[in-house]
Image (cartoon, rainbow, N blue to C red):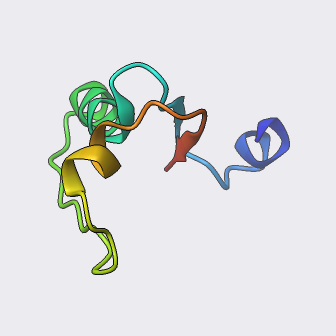
Amino acid sequence: LRVMRTEGLVLAYHDRSDGGLLATLAEMSFAARLGLDVSVPDDIDDVIAFLFNEEPGAVVQ
């Protein structure tokens, strides 16, 4: 990620642990003063669990 950031390929990145994916996306949108359009894959059975799961991961913009 550092190399990609230095080369201008990444605008921002954020871990998605505390609060899950939705909290991470909200924090990133607040910081960038942008809105969100979130699409959840059709094969997800539990959308709430998908959006608030706190497994390790990151969101890259």
**Residue lying furthest bottom in this view?**
42
Does residue 54 sit above or below 8 in this rendering?
A: above
Q: Nearer the viewer, residue 48 or 20?
A: 48
Q: Position of residue 25 (x, y in %)?
A: 31, 39
* Quadrant of the snapshot with the N terminus: top right
Residue 11 pos. (x, y %): 53, 44
Residue 46 at x, y percent in the picture: 24, 58
> Relative to residue 35, is residue 50 drawn left or right?
right
Answer above or below: position of 3 versus 24.
Answer: below
Rendered residue at 20%/34% (across/down): 33
* Total count of labels: 0
Residue that appears at 55% across and 47% down: 60
**Which residue is at 23% across, 33% downward?**
26
The answer to which quarter of the image holds residue 30 is: top left
Residue at (20, 43) in percent of width and height: 34
Residue lying at the far right of the rendered structure: 3
In this rendering, position of residue 28 left or right of residue 47: right
Q: Quadrant of residue 41?
A: bottom left
Furthest residue in direction top, as rendered: 18
Give coordinates of residue 5: x percent, y percent: 71, 41
In the displayed structure image, the side of residue 38 where residue 24 appears, left or right:
right
**Which residue is more in the foreground, 7 or 51?**
51
